[in-house]
């Protein structure tokens, strides 16, 4: 216990120290939100990866999908690396950097408002981002708190509150630069931690070959067969050790949600806003992909052996296992030093994701609602004229407002985390489905296609949020939250394309001016 507490205290002291170190660069809006648009490839790549993978993946997704799909769950990690990282950087990185800098966009809602010349798009997008990032944040709290409960014996409530307070401290102090530096430190811990834990867990099962052999003998339990989804209806012996598992189509839906979804999440795309230049994007692409392959691939590979450990608790009323307890139960027998490493691993992943989420939420609310246009700023100045001194004061005021909203956002998501309505994976599915379903298609197509119309963007907002909310209100009667999120994302491209063909085009000259950044 002494070792676990000592390592955790050292880690937390470092994160706060980084916040103090970075506070000088967080006085302006660009400094606080984007790190002055001068963050290098290593920091950006690690910030992207650590924001991508949190306790939601390590505890929630790895446990649930490893149990359902066996070794084939590892494909989710491969998809996260290839689609969620490599292709995301190649397709979005350069164009996002150039266009957002050209139109002076600081957030994704700001991009929608400027790119499509509609202030209400900016407002609605910021509300969507703020509302649906809350359940994702709550899921992150739940994941890390369950690991702390297992490793330290500290009640879930206290774990969540402590983590919320510490995250708030270093984000409020140092903004994006502090977050990026801490992400780099936390990313190194994640790389070392996941490889070590996998080696030890496999060794406890007699090695890789023996563990795979045992998985080949695993069969669905009686409770699995009670699952109303019909996931194991056509199960064949050896499916849990096969290439594509017992339900390939269902597995594909998870790959789409967790991989393609990052392309439409404000906290992920925002990383491309802040990177230094195009050469840094090329280097960041390689670094981010390797990081994702090790961390995401490792998490799902580890979770895929969940059936070799004690069966999780089953809720007869909900017809569901306590999936969030699978990975913690796999780690309970580890030596204290390794449990401390696991706690730091998940703490690193979770705090980096939380920092990114709260910074994104506060910046969108401040810049896209409270100070969404020049008039809202000029209204504070007598005569409507802004000199350099007044402009600097307003910049500082915006930063103060963002810091206040960080506290508000953390408190609100913490309240949900203390009374969670869903499992971790379902919370994340709802959040990713609504956000990426609404934002992915109009954002990506807006970078490439001049023909996207304003009404097409509105239609996609309605489609992504509407499908997710209706399905949630019907008790997931249409489809489970994971599949719903995947359908929302892919369907968004159809919606934007079709509506753009039949609705009035935007002003040709203004669109041409926006796309000059690529010449």
Image (tube, rainbow, N blue to C red):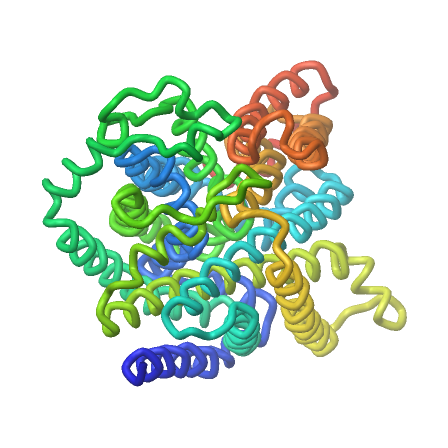
Q: Residue at 38% x, 62% y: name it.
A: 346
Q: Is residue 408 something one can see in this rendering?
A: yes
Q: In the figure, is residue 379 to the left or right of 135?
A: right
Quadrant where the N terminus sits is bottom left
Q: Horizontal and vertical percent for residue 397?
A: 71, 74
Residue 14: quadrant of the picture: bottom left
Q: Horizontal and vertical percent for residue 65?
A: 39, 39
Q: Residue at 10% x, 40% y: name it.
A: 209
Name the residue nearer the viewer: 60 or 78. 60
Q: Residue at 36% x, 35% y: name it.
A: 83
Q: Is residue 229 above or below residue 417?
A: above
Q: Horizontal and vertical percent for residue 474?
A: 70, 32
> How many numbered marks are there?
0
Name the residue nearer the viewer: 72 or 115. 72
Name the residue nearer the viewer: 332 or 491. 332
Q: Residue at 70% x, 14% y: name it.
A: 502
Residue furthest out toward the right: 383
Q: In the figure, is residue 430 to the left or right of 374?
A: left
Q: Is residue 98 something one can see in this rendering?
A: no
Q: Horizontal and vertical percent for residue 448?
A: 50, 30
Q: Is residue 501 above or below residue 482?
A: above
């Amino acid at each position: 216990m002494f070792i676990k507490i000592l390592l955790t205290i050292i880690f937390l002291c470092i994160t706060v120290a980084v916040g103090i170190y970075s506070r000088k660069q967080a006085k302006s809006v660009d400094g606080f939100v984007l790190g002055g648009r001068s963050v290098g490839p290593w920091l950006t790549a690690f910030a992207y990866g650590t924001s991508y993978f949190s306790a939601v993946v390590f505890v929630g997704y790895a446990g649930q999908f490893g149990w359902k799909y066996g070794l084939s769950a590892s494909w989710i990690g491969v998809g996260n690396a290839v689609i969620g990282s490599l292709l995301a950087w190649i397709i979005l990185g350069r164009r996002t950097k150039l266009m957002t800098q050209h139109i002076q966009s600081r957030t994704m809602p700001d991009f929608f408002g400027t790119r499509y010349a509609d202030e209400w798009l900016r407002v609605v997008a910021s509300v969507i981002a703020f509302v649906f990032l809350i359940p994702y944040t709550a899921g992150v709290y739940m994941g890390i708190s369950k690991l702390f409960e297992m490793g330290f014996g500290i009640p879930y409530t206290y774990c969540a509150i402590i983590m919320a307070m510490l995250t708030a401290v270093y984000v409020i102090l140092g903004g994006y630069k502090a977050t990026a530096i801490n992400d780099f430190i936390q990313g190194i811990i994640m790389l070392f931690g996941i490889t070590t834990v996998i080696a030890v867990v496999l060794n406890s099962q007699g090695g890789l070959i023996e563990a795979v052999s045992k998985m080949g003998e695993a069969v669905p339990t009686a409770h699995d067969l009670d699952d109303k989804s019909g996931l194991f209806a056509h199960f064949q012996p050896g499916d849990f050790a096969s290439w594509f598992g017992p339900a390939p189509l269902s597995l594909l839906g998870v790959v789409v949600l967790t991989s393609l979804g990052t392309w439409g999440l404000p906290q992920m795309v925002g990383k491309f806003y802040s990177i230094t230049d195009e050469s840094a994007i090329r280097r960041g692409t390689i670094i981010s992909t390797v990081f994702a392959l090790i961390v995401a691939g490792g998490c799902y590979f580890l979770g895929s052996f969940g059936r070799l450990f004690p069966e999780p608790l089953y809720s007869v009323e909900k017809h569901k296992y306590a999936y969030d307890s699978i990975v913690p139960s796999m780690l309970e027998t580890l030596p204290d030093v390794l449990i401390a490493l696991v706690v730091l691993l998940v703490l690193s992943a979770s705090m980096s994701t939380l920092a990114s989420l709260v910074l994104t939420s506060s910046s969108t609310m401040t810049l896209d609602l409270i100070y969404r246009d020049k008039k809202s700023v000029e209204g504070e100045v007598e005569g409507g004229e802004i000199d350099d001194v007044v402009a600097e004061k307003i910049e500082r005021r915006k930063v103060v407002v963002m810091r206040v909203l960080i506290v508000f956002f953390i408190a609100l998501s913490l309240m949900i985390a203390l009374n969670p309505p869903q499992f971790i994976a379902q919370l994340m599915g709802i959040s990713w489905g609504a956000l990426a379903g609404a934002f992915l298609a109009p954002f990506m197509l807006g970078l490439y296609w001049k023909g996207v119309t304003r009404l097409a963007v509105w239609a996609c907002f309605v489609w992504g949020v509407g499908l997710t909310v209706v399905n949630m209100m019907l008790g997931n009667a249409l489809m489970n939250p994971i599949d719903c999120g995947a359908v929302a994302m892919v369907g968004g491209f159809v919606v934007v394309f079709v509506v753009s063909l039949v609705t009035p085009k935007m002003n040709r000259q203004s669109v041409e001016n926006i796309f000059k950044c690529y010449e």
